[in-house]
Amino acid sequence: MGFKEKAIKLAKDFPSSDEVEFIPSGSVIMDAILGGGVPLGTYIEIASASGLGKSTAALHMSKIACSLGRGVIYLDYEQGVNKSQIDGIGLSDYRDELFFLYHPVTYKDGEKIINKLADEEELAYIIIDSVTSMLPESMRDKSVEDIQPALQARLATKFLLKYKYLARRNNVSFIFINQMRTKLNFRGTSSTKAAGGNAQKFFSDIRLRMGEKKKLEKTENTLEGEKKIPYGAHVGLWAIKNRYERPYIEATMTVIYGKGISNVSAYYRWLIKSGLIKKKGAGWYEIYMGKEDGEDPEKVRGEESLKKWVKENMDNVKEYIKEEGGFLLIADEKDIGGE
């Protein structure tokens, strides 16, 4: 038996597949960054500074998965997800049907939940929020003075190693919410890195980063009178590691706190880049989409009016962008999409 025959025979015992199942994230920007949607059977890390909407994005992704009939296990180690968020994002209809929220404390708690449910065919995501809040079992009753050094890092490595094969085998993606931490260097430049050490870097298939670009604010009547209150943010989103699309290409995603991800701004930015919307002086926008050559454009004033126009014409906008190639991270001379 020659090399080819032996190799083919072994392939039956150790099959490989180049086909990866992708499901929509609910964000046209995130889908572009990821390579066409969320690839199942992978480890995905989402990290940013506090308060930029990581959990909101993960809950929005959960809603989209559930709407497709897929299950989600959300391990809320930070005990931060509340009923208001679930209702606002639209997960209420799926609660205890396809979306299951748990409040574990230790690694062992997480293992118990995952081991019981990971073999279910409907399951798409296991979300861990966050990896830095997973407590070693031995730390429950010990004094902090008795805790072994680097215990958390060692357990994180074992946890990631153990479930990597399960993710591939069951076509389930683990989504790890992570925090950014500043490492002070008094002799040089300080650096900001994701927590979790080298294990998270090594085992993750995709590592996403979010950075604030612009806070979204609205005026509300507070105890101190009328104040501008943040209700969301435009965030830069990029991958520093990705097996399915080019990393280090940033695009802008809009997160509405407690509500989810909005694609409206992404759509009008696409139309502006394509020349179908032109910004004029004094805050006016001229809209050429759907107009014949020489026909006067529709005009709206202000960003809020432009958002309203996109919402009112959403089906036509989405269909047009799709026909023109969609959101592409790198656009050639013919393709306009992207950020």
Image: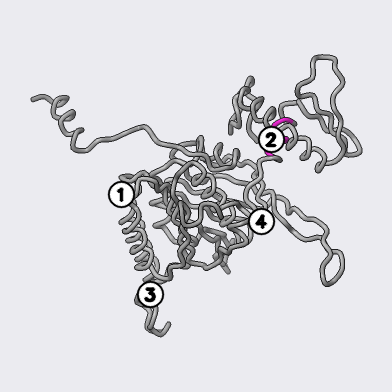
User: Could you tell me which residue is drawn at 61 percent across and 22 percent down?
Assistant: 323
Q: Nearer the viewer, residue 290 or 273?
A: 290
Q: What element carries label 4?
A: loop
Q: Quick one: which residue is furthest to the top in this view?
A: 293
**Which mark is in front, 4 or 3?**
4
**Which mark is in front, 4 or 1?**
4
**Which mark is in front, 1 or 3?**
1
Q: How far apart are marks 1 and 2 (CA)?
A: 38 Å
Per the picture, the main secondary structure of the magenta-coloured stretch is helix
User: Could you tell me which residue is drawn at 44 percent across and 40 percent down?
Assistant: 39
User: Could you tell me which residue is drawn at 66 percent across and 56 percent down?
Assistant: 257
Which one is earlier in the sequence, the residue at label 1 or at label 2? 1
Rendered location of residue 337, percent (x, y): 64, 29
Which one is earlier in the sequence, the residue at label 4 or at label 1? 1
The amino acid at mark 2 is Tyr
Dot 3 corresponds to which residue? 149
Q: Is residue 24 left or right of residue 140?
A: right
Dot 4 corresponds to which residue? 257
Q: How far apart are marks 3 and 2 (CA)?
A: 49 Å
Quarter of the image with the C terminus in it:
top right
Dot 1 corresponds to which residue? 165
What colour scheme has been applied to the protein in the rendered image?
one colour
Give the magenta-colored segment's residue range.
266-271
Q: Is residue 245 magenta?
A: no
The amino acid at mark 1 is Tyr
The numbered dot on residue 267 is: 2
Rendered location of residue 18, percent (x, y): 35, 32
